[in-house]
Image (cartoon, rainbow, N blue to C red):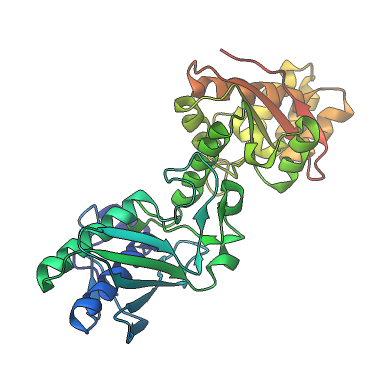
Amino acid sequence: MGDGGGRDAQLKHTGLRPGWTTGACATAAATAAYTAVLTGDFPDPVTVGLPKGHTPSFALAVEEVRADGTATAGVVKDAGDDPDVTHGALVRATARRLPPGSGVTFRAGPGVGTVTRPGLPLEVGEPAVNPVPRQLMRDHVARVAAEHGGSGDVELTLSVDHGEEIARSTWNPRLGILGGLSILGTTGVVVPYSCSAWIDSIRRGVDVARAAGRTHVAGCTGSTSERTVVAAYGLPDDALLDMGDFAGAVLKYVRRHPVDRLTLCGGFAKLSKLAAGHLDLHSKRSQVDKGFLAELALQGGADDALAAEVAAANTGLAALQSCTAHGVPLGDLVALTARDRALGVLRGAPVAVDVVCIDRAGEIVGRSAVHGP
């Protein structure tokens, strides 16, 4: 698979290979399928133009022209060096002529989801093909029509082999996208380890919660913290944001799209990173600062010997255990400081915040009061 337009220059120094979104793959498949409808032949490889000037060429894994005049093309997604759950998925597009004036319409085939809840950038009942990929496909249909004398009126049915199974490990079910994956991508390029799909899912989760009228949402670092906030607050499924390590993504989006109350819940060590000022909580991009924890312990009444023990602890949890044994509320201090860091990122947005720290078993080991601007 070549790229006539070149790959992102900013990635060259990383040694990581970028890849292509499901939207780019669907555009390539749709372009090839519509070309075959008009000409009987498939371009292979098929070259597409993406929003930032990339012009990748995709080899076709599926080519089929049927007696009814429809044509199907398929492209295997290459996500590069990104750990993308859709890497290797076969993305198919089937093109069928429509009467003049119909334009380009989209249908969800097997493995592509359908929108069932408001709050997403698509109407309820629409196939989960996001706006940018839709426009890319419209643009390429118009180009093919101009080259081969077509009207540009075509139905595109998009499908992903095993997409319904793959979607179970994504946010789609929680967002109300049922039956399969979404066709995603704003640039067409997958930047390795940018986790853009996860961050986009956080944003869509906020949108869905707001559309459902939720006034209290929770950003959780994992399934254990989700269970904790459900038990503590009785929050429904669509009020839970799978924040993972991306505390900053939650806070920045809620700053622009406020809810009345935001609870952040996660492991003590992760939330100590937020308390120390880190917005990305991944172990490769931020570390637990035991010196910072020692300073908090001193503020909570620790003597110098305990502070030294905290600073020398092997893990954040060990530091917490030392403080607990001496009656120093380090968990509460971390939660309070993390809450204040969060309020700082919110910059006065009308959002009240509280923070809950848990241990690995899901027991609450620290908690802040709710506070707003």
Q: Is residue 51 above or below residue 33?
A: above
Q: Quadrant of residue 232?
A: top right
Q: Position of residue 238 (x, y in %)?
A: 63, 40
Who is closer to the viewer here, 76 or 13?
76
Which residue shows up at 74% across the image and 35% down it? 229
Q: Residue at x 41, y 62 (%)?
A: 107
Can you name the residue that lies furthest to the bottom here? 67
Q: Position of residue 181 (x, y in %)?
A: 50, 60
Q: Residue furthest top?
A: 373
Which residue is located at x 59 percent, y 21 percent? Answer: 260
Image coords of residue 39 (percent x, y): 18, 81
Of the pair 188 and 306, the residue shown nearer to us:
188
| Residue 10 in sight | yes
- Whether residue 58 sits left or right of residue 234 in the image: it is left
Quadrant of the rendering where the N terminus is positioned? bottom left
> Where 110 falls versus 184 (above or below)?
below
Query: Is residue 279 shown to the viewer in this render?
Result: no
Vertical arrangement, residue 257 with respect to residue 152, above or below:
above
Residue 273: percent from left, percent from top: 61, 35
Looking at the image, residue 299 sits to the left or right of residue 183; the answer is right
